[in-house]
Image (cartoon, rainbow, N blue to C red):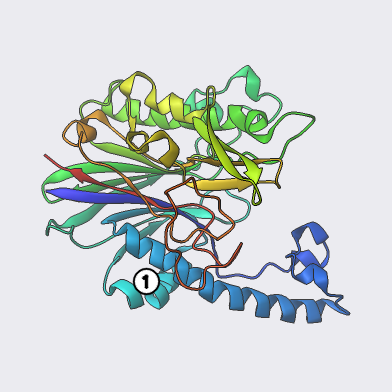
Protein backbone atom coordinates (compact mmCIF):
# COMPACT_ATOMS: atom_id res chain seq x y z
CA UNK A 1 0.00 0.00 0.00
CA UNK A 2 1.28 3.45 -0.90
CA UNK A 3 0.39 7.08 -0.22
CA UNK A 4 1.52 10.07 -2.27
CA UNK A 5 2.18 13.26 -0.31
CA UNK A 6 2.87 16.71 -1.76
CA UNK A 7 3.55 20.21 -0.49
CA UNK A 8 2.87 23.40 -2.43
CA UNK A 9 3.06 27.10 -1.60
CA UNK A 10 0.27 28.35 -3.85
CA UNK A 11 1.38 32.00 -3.53
CA UNK A 12 -1.48 34.13 -2.26
CA UNK A 13 -4.52 31.96 -2.91
CA UNK A 14 -6.84 34.79 -1.86
CA UNK A 15 -10.41 35.90 -2.53
CA UNK A 16 -10.04 39.52 -1.46
CA UNK A 17 -8.69 42.65 -3.11
CA UNK A 18 -5.85 44.75 -1.74
CA UNK A 19 -6.51 48.45 -2.30
CA UNK A 20 -3.77 49.70 0.02
CA UNK A 21 -1.60 50.58 -2.97
CA UNK A 22 -3.62 53.74 -3.58
CA UNK A 23 -2.17 55.32 -0.44
CA UNK A 24 1.07 53.31 -0.22
CA UNK A 25 2.99 53.15 -3.48
CA UNK A 26 5.18 50.36 -2.12
CA UNK A 27 2.05 48.16 -2.05
CA UNK A 28 0.98 49.14 -5.55
CA UNK A 29 1.21 46.66 -8.40
CA UNK A 30 3.80 47.64 -10.99
CA UNK A 31 1.24 47.97 -13.80
CA UNK A 32 -0.77 50.42 -11.69
CA UNK A 33 2.32 52.58 -11.34
CA UNK A 34 2.15 53.28 -15.08
CA UNK A 35 -1.11 55.18 -14.66
CA UNK A 36 -2.33 58.28 -12.85
CA UNK A 37 -5.59 57.73 -11.01
CA UNK A 38 -7.78 60.74 -10.32
CA UNK A 39 -9.67 59.15 -7.45
CA UNK A 40 -9.56 56.23 -5.07
CA UNK A 41 -12.75 54.85 -6.64
CA UNK A 42 -11.08 54.82 -10.05
CA UNK A 43 -8.08 53.01 -8.56
CA UNK A 44 -10.40 50.42 -6.98
CA UNK A 45 -12.06 49.71 -10.33
CA UNK A 46 -8.72 49.33 -12.10
CA UNK A 47 -7.31 47.09 -9.37
CA UNK A 48 -10.35 44.81 -9.44
CA UNK A 49 -10.06 44.46 -13.24
CA UNK A 50 -6.32 43.78 -13.04
CA UNK A 51 -6.60 41.23 -10.23
CA UNK A 52 -9.48 39.27 -11.74
CA UNK A 53 -7.85 39.13 -15.17
CA UNK A 54 -4.55 37.86 -13.80
CA UNK A 55 -6.10 35.55 -11.20
CA UNK A 56 -8.00 33.37 -13.66
CA UNK A 57 -4.86 32.49 -15.62
CA UNK A 58 -2.83 32.11 -12.44
CA UNK A 59 -5.26 29.70 -10.81
CA UNK A 60 -5.57 27.59 -13.93
CA UNK A 61 -1.80 27.17 -13.77
CA UNK A 62 -1.91 26.48 -10.02
CA UNK A 63 -4.48 23.76 -10.61
CA UNK A 64 -2.41 22.23 -13.41
CA UNK A 65 0.60 22.01 -11.08
CA UNK A 66 -1.52 20.35 -8.38
CA UNK A 67 -2.96 17.94 -10.94
CA UNK A 68 0.56 17.00 -12.06
CA UNK A 69 1.67 16.47 -8.45
CA UNK A 70 -1.18 13.91 -8.29
CA UNK A 71 -1.01 13.61 -4.51
CA UNK A 72 -3.34 11.71 -2.22
CA UNK A 73 -2.52 14.21 0.55
CA UNK A 74 -1.72 17.80 -0.40
CA UNK A 75 -0.18 20.23 2.11
CA UNK A 76 -0.68 23.88 1.13
CA UNK A 77 0.67 27.24 2.18
CA UNK A 78 -0.69 30.76 1.56
CA UNK A 79 -4.41 29.97 1.45
CA UNK A 80 -6.77 32.67 2.74
CA UNK A 81 -9.58 30.57 4.18
CA UNK A 82 -11.61 27.41 3.77
CA UNK A 83 -14.22 29.11 1.59
CA UNK A 84 -11.52 30.28 -0.83
CA UNK A 85 -10.11 26.76 -0.94
CA UNK A 86 -13.54 25.28 -1.68
CA UNK A 87 -14.08 27.79 -4.50
CA UNK A 88 -10.67 27.08 -6.01
CA UNK A 89 -11.11 23.31 -5.77
CA UNK A 90 -14.57 23.43 -7.36
CA UNK A 91 -13.89 26.11 -9.99
CA UNK A 92 -10.46 24.95 -11.14
CA UNK A 93 -9.26 21.60 -9.79
CA UNK A 94 -12.57 19.84 -10.30
CA UNK A 95 -12.57 20.79 -13.98
CA UNK A 96 -9.18 19.11 -14.40
CA UNK A 97 -9.27 16.03 -12.18
CA UNK A 98 -12.92 15.57 -11.30
CA UNK A 99 -14.09 14.58 -7.85
CA UNK A 100 -10.69 14.77 -6.20
CA UNK A 101 -10.02 16.47 -2.89
CA UNK A 102 -13.20 16.05 -0.86
CA UNK A 103 -11.63 16.54 2.59
CA UNK A 104 -10.11 19.91 3.50
CA UNK A 105 -8.57 21.29 6.67
CA UNK A 106 -7.67 24.93 7.38
CA UNK A 107 -7.34 26.81 10.66
CA UNK A 108 -6.62 30.55 10.83
CA UNK A 109 -3.07 31.14 12.03
CA UNK A 110 -0.92 34.09 13.04
CA UNK A 111 0.00 35.68 9.72
CA UNK A 112 -0.97 39.36 9.52
CA UNK A 113 -1.69 39.03 5.79
CA UNK A 114 -4.18 36.23 6.42
CA UNK A 115 -2.27 33.53 4.54
CA UNK A 116 -2.84 30.20 6.23
CA UNK A 117 -1.89 26.55 6.11
CA UNK A 118 -4.23 23.94 4.65
CA UNK A 119 -4.38 20.25 3.91
CA UNK A 120 -6.54 18.43 1.38
CA UNK A 121 -6.97 14.70 0.87
CA UNK A 122 -8.63 12.40 -1.59
CA UNK A 123 -11.12 9.87 -0.28
CA UNK A 124 -8.87 6.97 -1.35
CA UNK A 125 -5.26 6.50 -2.38
CA UNK A 126 -4.42 5.47 -5.92
CA UNK A 127 -4.37 1.82 -4.86
CA UNK A 128 -7.74 2.07 -3.12
CA UNK A 129 -6.94 2.55 0.58
CA UNK A 130 -9.37 4.79 2.43
CA UNK A 131 -7.98 8.08 3.77
CA UNK A 132 -9.45 9.36 7.03
CA UNK A 133 -8.64 12.57 8.89
CA UNK A 134 -8.70 11.58 12.55
CA UNK A 135 -7.64 14.73 14.36
CA UNK A 136 -6.47 18.25 13.59
CA UNK A 137 -4.42 20.37 16.01
CA UNK A 138 -3.32 23.98 15.62
CA UNK A 139 -0.22 25.16 17.48
CA UNK A 140 -0.63 28.82 16.51
CA UNK A 141 -1.04 29.80 20.16
CA UNK A 142 2.33 28.36 21.26
CA UNK A 143 4.83 30.92 22.60
CA UNK A 144 8.63 30.76 22.55
CA UNK A 145 8.60 30.42 26.32
CA UNK A 146 5.99 27.64 26.40
CA UNK A 147 7.81 25.77 23.67
CA UNK A 148 11.10 26.12 25.52
CA UNK A 149 12.90 27.54 22.47
CA UNK A 150 13.61 31.15 23.47
CA UNK A 151 17.31 32.02 23.15
CA UNK A 152 19.31 35.27 23.56
CA UNK A 153 19.78 35.65 19.79
CA UNK A 154 16.03 36.24 19.51
CA UNK A 155 16.09 39.27 21.81
CA UNK A 156 16.20 41.84 18.98
CA UNK A 157 13.21 40.38 17.12
CA UNK A 158 10.96 38.67 19.68
CA UNK A 159 9.94 38.46 23.32
CA UNK A 160 9.55 35.19 25.26
CA UNK A 161 5.74 35.42 25.29
CA UNK A 162 5.48 36.06 21.53
CA UNK A 163 4.04 33.30 19.37
CA UNK A 164 6.76 31.09 17.99
CA UNK A 165 5.05 30.17 14.71
CA UNK A 166 4.70 33.06 12.30
CA UNK A 167 1.78 31.18 10.69
CA UNK A 168 1.15 27.89 12.48
CA UNK A 169 2.26 24.31 12.79
CA UNK A 170 -0.83 22.39 11.64
CA UNK A 171 -0.74 18.85 13.02
CA UNK A 172 -3.00 16.39 11.19
CA UNK A 173 -3.45 12.75 12.18
CA UNK A 174 -4.55 10.49 9.34
CA UNK A 175 -5.40 6.87 8.81
CA UNK A 176 -4.58 5.35 5.42
CA UNK A 177 -6.13 1.92 5.23
CA UNK A 178 -4.99 0.41 8.52
CA UNK A 179 -1.84 2.57 8.84
CA UNK A 180 -1.43 5.77 10.87
CA UNK A 181 0.39 8.86 9.64
CA UNK A 182 0.91 12.31 11.17
CA UNK A 183 1.59 15.33 8.97
CA UNK A 184 2.95 18.62 10.29
CA UNK A 185 2.27 21.44 7.81
CA UNK A 186 4.50 24.50 8.28
CA UNK A 187 5.39 27.82 6.70
CA UNK A 188 8.34 29.38 8.46
CA UNK A 189 9.30 33.05 8.74
CA UNK A 190 10.25 34.63 5.41
CA UNK A 191 13.84 35.81 4.87
CA UNK A 192 12.96 39.39 4.02
CA UNK A 193 15.29 42.00 2.59
CA UNK A 194 18.84 42.85 3.72
CA UNK A 195 19.07 45.14 6.74
CA UNK A 196 22.01 47.17 8.03
CA UNK A 197 24.41 45.32 5.79
CA UNK A 198 23.14 41.89 6.87
CA UNK A 199 21.46 39.65 4.31
CA UNK A 200 17.81 38.73 4.88
CA UNK A 201 18.46 35.05 5.56
CA UNK A 202 20.96 35.78 8.33
CA UNK A 203 18.84 38.55 9.86
CA UNK A 204 15.78 36.28 10.28
CA UNK A 205 17.60 32.99 10.88
CA UNK A 206 17.01 32.83 14.63
CA UNK A 207 13.23 32.97 14.15
CA UNK A 208 13.15 30.05 11.69
CA UNK A 209 15.51 28.00 13.81
CA UNK A 210 13.22 28.52 16.79
CA UNK A 211 10.22 27.44 14.70
CA UNK A 212 12.05 24.28 13.62
CA UNK A 213 13.10 23.53 17.19
CA UNK A 214 9.49 23.95 18.31
CA UNK A 215 8.28 21.48 15.64
CA UNK A 216 10.88 18.96 16.70
CA UNK A 217 9.90 19.35 20.36
CA UNK A 218 6.23 18.80 19.52
CA UNK A 219 7.12 15.56 17.74
CA UNK A 220 9.48 14.42 20.51
CA UNK A 221 6.95 15.13 23.24
CA UNK A 222 4.42 13.03 21.42
CA UNK A 223 6.48 10.20 19.94
CA UNK A 224 9.77 10.26 21.85
CA UNK A 225 13.21 11.73 21.23
CA UNK A 226 13.95 9.32 18.38
CA UNK A 227 10.50 9.55 16.81
CA UNK A 228 9.31 6.38 18.48
CA UNK A 229 9.23 4.44 15.26
CA UNK A 230 6.19 6.43 14.11
CA UNK A 231 5.32 7.65 10.64
CA UNK A 232 5.42 11.44 10.38
CA UNK A 233 6.17 14.05 7.76
CA UNK A 234 7.05 17.72 8.21
CA UNK A 235 5.86 19.38 5.01
CA UNK A 236 5.90 22.95 3.82
CA UNK A 237 7.77 26.10 2.93
CA UNK A 238 10.73 26.49 5.29
CA UNK A 239 11.89 29.77 3.72
CA UNK A 240 15.39 28.40 4.23
CA UNK A 241 17.90 26.27 2.37
CA UNK A 242 20.96 24.15 3.02
CA UNK A 243 22.45 24.80 -0.41
CA UNK A 244 21.85 26.92 -3.47
CA UNK A 245 22.90 27.20 -7.10
CA UNK A 246 24.44 30.63 -7.57
CA UNK A 247 23.75 31.96 -11.08
CA UNK A 248 26.27 34.09 -12.94
CA UNK A 249 26.60 35.12 -16.58
CA UNK A 250 24.09 36.67 -18.95
CA UNK A 251 21.89 35.97 -21.96
CA UNK A 252 24.65 36.85 -24.42
CA UNK A 253 27.41 34.69 -22.93
CA UNK A 254 25.36 32.02 -21.23
CA UNK A 255 24.64 31.24 -17.58
CA UNK A 256 26.66 29.29 -15.03
CA UNK A 257 25.19 27.49 -12.02
CA UNK A 258 27.59 27.00 -9.12
CA UNK A 259 26.59 24.90 -6.08
CA UNK A 260 27.18 26.63 -2.76
CA UNK A 261 26.50 25.10 0.65
CA UNK A 262 24.84 27.17 3.36
CA UNK A 263 25.68 26.92 7.03
CA UNK A 264 23.24 26.27 9.85
CA UNK A 265 19.57 26.87 9.19
CA UNK A 266 16.14 25.56 10.15
CA UNK A 267 16.27 22.46 7.96
CA UNK A 268 19.23 20.96 9.77
CA UNK A 269 17.43 21.30 13.11
CA UNK A 270 14.95 18.67 11.92
CA UNK A 271 17.35 16.43 9.97
CA UNK A 272 20.08 16.32 12.64
CA UNK A 273 20.75 12.88 14.07
CA UNK A 274 18.56 11.20 11.48
CA UNK A 275 15.39 12.58 13.08
CA UNK A 276 13.92 13.14 9.61
CA UNK A 277 15.15 12.85 6.03
CA UNK A 278 14.94 15.57 3.40
CA UNK A 279 13.81 13.26 0.61
CA UNK A 280 14.60 15.86 -2.07
CA UNK A 281 18.29 15.37 -1.21
CA UNK A 282 17.97 12.04 -3.05
CA UNK A 283 17.92 13.98 -6.31
CA UNK A 284 21.17 15.13 -7.99
CA UNK A 285 22.77 18.22 -6.48
CA UNK A 286 21.89 20.43 -9.45
CA UNK A 287 18.29 19.27 -9.52
CA UNK A 288 16.90 19.92 -6.01
CA UNK A 289 15.68 23.49 -6.38
CA UNK A 290 12.06 24.55 -5.89
CA UNK A 291 12.39 28.34 -6.23
CA UNK A 292 14.18 30.89 -8.38
CA UNK A 293 15.33 33.93 -6.40
CA UNK A 294 16.45 37.18 -8.01
CA UNK A 295 16.88 40.81 -7.04
CA UNK A 296 18.34 41.61 -10.45
CA UNK A 297 21.37 40.39 -12.42
CA UNK A 298 23.70 40.78 -9.43
CA UNK A 299 21.73 38.46 -7.12
CA UNK A 300 20.30 35.27 -8.57
CA UNK A 301 20.12 31.71 -7.36
CA UNK A 302 18.04 28.54 -7.34
CA UNK A 303 17.36 26.83 -4.03
CA UNK A 304 15.12 24.38 -2.23
CA UNK A 305 12.64 26.11 0.09
CA UNK A 306 9.92 23.44 -0.04
CA UNK A 307 10.38 20.24 1.96
CA UNK A 308 9.04 16.82 2.73
CA UNK A 309 10.97 15.71 5.81
CA UNK A 310 10.02 12.12 6.53
CA UNK A 311 10.59 10.05 9.67
CA UNK A 312 12.91 7.02 9.67
CA UNK A 313 9.87 4.74 10.05
CA UNK A 314 8.48 6.17 6.82
CA UNK A 315 11.67 6.18 4.78
CA UNK A 316 13.26 2.86 5.73
CA UNK A 317 11.01 0.98 3.29
CA UNK A 318 11.33 3.68 0.61
CA UNK A 319 15.04 3.81 -0.07
CA UNK A 320 14.58 3.50 -3.84
CA UNK A 321 11.81 6.08 -4.14
CA UNK A 322 12.54 9.47 -5.72
CA UNK A 323 10.56 12.69 -5.11
CA UNK A 324 9.13 14.72 -7.98
CA UNK A 325 9.41 18.49 -8.39
CA UNK A 326 6.77 20.03 -10.67
CA UNK A 327 8.36 22.94 -12.53
CA UNK A 328 6.05 23.39 -15.53
CA UNK A 329 4.28 26.28 -13.80
CA UNK A 330 7.44 28.34 -13.40
CA UNK A 331 7.52 31.63 -15.33
CA UNK A 332 9.80 31.94 -18.34
CA UNK A 333 12.17 34.23 -16.41
CA UNK A 334 13.25 31.28 -14.25
CA UNK A 335 16.70 30.15 -15.31
CA UNK A 336 17.03 26.37 -15.60
CA UNK A 337 20.35 24.48 -15.50
CA UNK A 338 21.24 22.70 -18.70
CA UNK A 339 19.04 19.71 -19.44
CA UNK A 340 16.32 20.61 -16.92
CA UNK A 341 14.03 22.75 -19.07
CA UNK A 342 10.40 21.64 -19.13
CA UNK A 343 7.41 22.46 -21.32
CA UNK A 344 5.61 25.29 -19.55
CA UNK A 345 1.86 25.22 -19.15
CA UNK A 346 -0.12 27.19 -21.77
CA UNK A 347 -0.36 30.96 -21.11
CA UNK A 348 2.55 30.97 -18.65
CA UNK A 349 4.12 34.42 -18.80
CA UNK A 350 7.67 35.75 -18.55
CA UNK A 351 7.06 36.75 -14.93
CA UNK A 352 3.30 36.19 -14.63
CA UNK A 353 0.92 34.51 -14.83
CA UNK A 354 2.53 31.49 -13.22
CA UNK A 355 1.40 28.57 -11.06
CA UNK A 356 3.36 30.01 -8.13
CA UNK A 357 6.83 31.26 -7.35
CA UNK A 358 7.32 27.85 -5.68
CA UNK A 359 7.27 24.37 -7.20
CA UNK A 360 5.20 21.52 -5.76
CA UNK A 361 7.22 18.66 -4.27
CA UNK A 362 5.62 15.19 -4.22
CA UNK A 363 6.68 11.68 -3.28
CA UNK A 364 5.04 8.29 -3.06
CA UNK A 365 5.71 6.37 0.17
CA UNK A 366 5.22 2.67 0.81
CA UNK A 367 3.29 2.01 4.00
CA UNK A 368 4.39 -1.33 5.45
From where the camera sits, is residue 349 visible?
yes
Q: Judge whether 96 appears above or below 105 on screen.
A: below
Residue at the image point whose x is 26% and y is 56% from the top: 72
> Image quarter for residue 163?
top right
Element under disc 1: helix
State whether residue 241 appears in this view.
Answer: no
Where residue 19 sits: x, y (%)? 73, 69
263 and 268: which one is in front? 263
Q: Report which quarter residue 223 is drawn in.
A: top left
Q: Nearer the viewer, residue 254 or 201?
A: 254
Residue 270 against residue 79 in the figure, above or below: above
Residue 347: x and y, percent? Answer: 51, 73
Residue found 50% across the figure and 52% down from its top: 358
Residue in the foreground of this view, choosing between 275 and 69: 69
Whether residue 268 sits left or right of residue 70 in the image: it is right
Residue in the foreground of this view, choosing between 195 and 103 = 195
In the displayed structure, 26 sits above or below 243; it is below
Which residue is under mark 1? 93
Asked if residue 208 lies left or right of residue 274, the reply is right
Callout 1: few (<14), some (14-19), or many (20+) C-alpha neighbours within 10 Å? many
Q: Position of residue 270 (x, y in %)?
A: 40, 28
Which percent across, then down, holds residue 15?
Answer: 55, 70
Relative to 61, residue 149 above or below: above
Q: Quadrant of the C terminus?
A: top left
Residue under the image location 38 percent in, 70 percent down: 89
Identify which residue is drawn at 42% across, 63% down: 343
In the image, 143: left or right of 30?
A: left
Amino acid sequence: MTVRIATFNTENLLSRFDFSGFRNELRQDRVAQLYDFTSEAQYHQAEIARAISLTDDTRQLTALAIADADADILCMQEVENLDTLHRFEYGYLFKMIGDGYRHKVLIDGNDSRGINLALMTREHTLDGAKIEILEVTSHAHLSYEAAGVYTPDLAEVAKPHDKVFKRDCLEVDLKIGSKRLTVYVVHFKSMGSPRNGVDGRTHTMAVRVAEARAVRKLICERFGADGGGKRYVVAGDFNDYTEKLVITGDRRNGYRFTPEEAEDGAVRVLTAGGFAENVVARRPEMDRWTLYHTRGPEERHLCQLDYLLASPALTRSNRDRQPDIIRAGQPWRTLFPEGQDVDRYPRTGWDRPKASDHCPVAMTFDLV
